[in-house]
Image: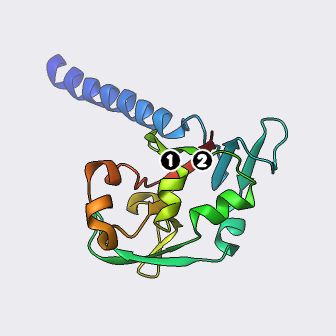
Amino acid sequence: MLKKTILPFMWVMISACLSADVTHAAMRLPNGCKKNVFLTITGKIDRITNSADSTYEMSEREFLALPTSTVTTSTPWTPKSDFVGPLLTEILQEVGAKGNKLRLVALDDFSVDVDGDYLGNYGTILASKRDGVRLTVRDFGPIFVMYPRDSFRKELDTPFGASHMVWQLCGIVVG
């Protein structure tokens, strides 16, 4: 009888502990991102909105008001789709970026260092829509770094190129 009572209780306790760890991990944001900020840009920039830590904190409203471009391409994770968002170069101009080395930071704590000129050469956008539907955290969003991979297969359809297609983008560090 005691065994029948203790085992279910132990499973409940283990589940509660695991849930707490997952909840705690979900609340932690990677270095370079901020809670309640759609896109955080920091580093060598001239324009800042938060003088306490010299960052440009772009709201979702501000991001969605920017002029957009469309990139029609497939990715290693999606079929050919129409991705829509502002050009990365325009966002960097908006904040007065003074460097061409970028660290792209995602909500899942993935980050990659990239050459801004390399991304700019291909008309890279920060997509917020795919086939007319807003991207969500569950579906590569809210921001997915996208370039025309299908149009430049030799240059971009590589593991190196795929590593630059950061989804769940939340921060850019300009160096």
Identify the image quadrant of residue 19: top left
Would residue 113 be visible to someone looking at this image?
A: yes
Of the two numbered discs 1 and 2 on the same chain, state the one appearing first in sequence. 2
Task: Specify whether 96 is left or right of 27.
Answer: right
| Dot 1 and dot 2 residues touching (CB under 8 Å) | yes
Residue under label 1: 115
The structure residue drawn at horizontal position 41% and vertical position 51%, both measured from the top left corner, is 164
Task: Specify whether 146 is left or right of 60.
Answer: left
State the image coordinates of residue 79 (x, y, percent, origin top left).
Answer: 26, 73
135 vs 167: above or below: below
State the image coordinates of residue 171 (x, y, percent, origin top left).
Answer: 59, 47
Report, in whole angstroms, how far the alpha carbon at label 1 lies from the one at label 2.
6 Å
Residue under label 2: 100
Identify the image quadrant of residue 53: top right
165 vs 105: above or below: below
State the image coordinates of residue 42 (x, y, percent, origin top left).
Answer: 69, 42
Identify the image quadrant of residue 88: bottom right
